[in-house]
Amino acid sequence: MPVSRTATPRPEMSRRPLRAALLAAWLGGLAATQASGAAADTGTEAALAGGDAARGAELFGQCSGCHQVGVGAVNRVGPHLNGVFDRRAGSVPGFAYSDAMDRMGADGLIWGYRTLDAYLENPRALVSRTRMSYRGMADPGDRADVLAFLRTYSARPSDIPESPPTASDAGHDLDPAILAIQGDPDYGEYLSGECITCHSAQGADTGIPSITRWPEEDFVIALHAYKERLRPHPAMQMIAARLSDEEIAALAAYFGSLTPD
Amino acid sequence: MPLTRRKILASGAAVAAAMAAPMLRAQGRPRVVVIGGGAGGATAARYIAKDSDGAIDVTLIEPTRSYYTCFFSNLYLGGFREIDSLAHSYGRLASDHGINVVHDWATGIDRDARTVALAGGGAVPYDRLIVAPGIDFVDGAVPGWSLAAQNAMPHAYKGGSQTELLKARVAAMPEGGTFVMVAPPNPYRCPPGPYERVSMIAHYLREHNPTAKILIADPKEKFSKMALFQEGWNDNYPGMVDRIGPDFGGADVEVRPETMEVVIDGEVVKADACNVIPAMKAGHIVHAAALTEGNWAPVVPATMQSRMDENIHILGDAAAQGDMPKSGFAANSQAKVAAMAVRGALTGSRVFPAKFSNTCWSLIDTDNGVKVGASYTATDEKIASVDSFISQTGETADLRAATYRESLGWYDAIAADMFG
């Protein structure tokens, strides 16, 4: 399908206020981290370690329509969540995952505090085409509680909060100012040449995901997630590692400016 | 179909643009000539034409009307692709981008007059010339082999008929026969290519001729993705593949095409099919135009300009640029940098810092793909590697299958990026 730039507001615009609020919440715990420099004590990690499992059990009511956990749990609309910690994404036998989740699992996405926290907060920021129709849990404390609850069904030594590797993650460190950068679409168009050798310029999704017409915020978050090695794909980690914040914004501006004719 | 961002951007000013274009032509648009319609040349021609919106007159000189990619030709040998799926025409470069596609051989470059001579007669003038001729073979590199012997012992290192010939030779091997590959010394096109080819021929033989053997005579101590291929051969084709490295005479090879013999370190081996991949050099025309140092044509990394002539850019396999491998992916990457530099020089368009990248996928067996890749930057001396990754031994079947699917997506994407 041909794609082109348009000067009119995009359909995504209507989702902007909600998305912005979610992002603000997602990033909320980060400013303090940034200010305190490279100290390992991040808001996310601290919140996770202090999660209240009992409160998490109540919050899990938002999830239980689709997910079961505990004795006798089986796959329903979503996969069961017993033993989810340290499990490879997309790996519960007998559950039909989205292609996107299959791909993330094949790429090496392992569920742990950091990855589950990011997924709960904004599922599509981590797994772009996930089938999980959940808008995300904005409050870091709520997420920590839910994860503390889920952790009780993943009873292995590595799930103890103080024990590596699950408790040693540095947390997100995306500065809200990064998200506010206005990208230069002309620069993005040049930089996009590096992308479309693999990612179809026409938006085809055969073996390599489509990256056209994403909301700009999702694009920026996804590339920074690769840059931070939160998302697992080695080629994308390498590409993102040398993109500056301005270059990521430029790419987001360019790809976001493409819409169907 | 191509991105049409620029077309839509221009829609508000469509009338003005339509009126301006003939004026530009009347005044004589700057002329870019591209020699060679592969991953480097086709991409460069397309990007210059597409991004200059008709402000630059682009001529592409390419002898073949159907271009068969060398990349993925090994998958044809293994039975994973049809040969037709590797063929591409230049129709959309002409119809969608207004490129003047000339199917002829470029026989010489007059650097003073800035013209390219054609085998069919006449000369094409240029303001900037892009040369992307790919590789030729070093004469006498493998004693006993010459282009006259390429029917008996195909190189199959340029896409198309040679690839088909090699497949026919393998298919005609007697039961339990021997396939011999004479592997090339560095540097050469597609570093993992010979070893992916061994994997694909092993796959074919396991299905059709399981007692057949594969022997590789190799002048190199090590090769690309060596651990991955060796693991793959052991796991999937046990006992079928033997490699003789330089320690055991793999660099001391003579061939006798008339008797189908290969002499390795004095030992005569009877081959039922033989693939000779000789040492390589830049395509003939850059030598004829005195643009080379040794076997390759040195370039300025930031622009891919020849170090001998600033009006000429050299792309892909023919270029001596530094750390990038000679691959279709690399040529495509370099082409975009060169296209930007050429537009900047001829029309004053914005020029951004050069960035290069490369990924090479290889197929070992069904749904068993591996990859290696790197990113690069332009220094004064060379294109320098800044980061890299490679598949690991012992990866899960899921990951290998996903890697293979990636390669299929990449093929479609780069083909569209080259040919529209």
Image: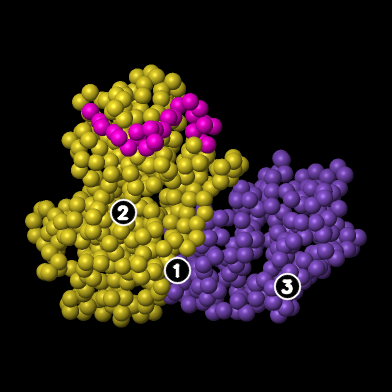
Chain colours: A purple, B yellow
- Give the mark toward the camera: 2 or 1: 2
| Cα–Cα gap, marks 3 and 2 | 48 Å
Q: First in sequence: mark 1 or mark 3?
A: 3
Task: Indicate the position of residue B157 as horizontal and vertical percent values.
Answer: 30, 42
Work out which residue is located at the far front of the displayed protein and give it: B247
Q: Are marks 3 and 2 in contact (CB under 8 Å)?
A: no
Amino acid type of disc 2? Asp
Q: Are marks 1 and 3 in contact (CB under 8 Å)?
A: no
Give the residue at x 19% y 52%.
B284
Task: Indicate the position of residue A22 as horizontal and vertical percent values.
Answer: 71, 72
Looking at the rendered structure, which numbered label has been put on residue A191? 1
Residue B162 relative to residue B196: left or right? left
**Tag 1 subunit:** A
Position above or below: A100 against B96: above
In the rendered image, which quarter is residue A202 located in?
Answer: bottom left
Give the residue at x 60% y 51%.
A107
Q: Which residue is mark 3?
A: A39
Amino acid type of disc 1? Leu
> Can residue B239 be found in the magenta stretch?
yes
Give the residue at x 43% y 43%.
B222
- In depth, the one of B246 and B208 nearer the eye is B246
Q: Residues within 10 Å of mark 1 (few under 14, many from 20)?
A: many
> Can residue A55 be found in the magenta stretch?
no
Amino acid type of disc 3? Ala
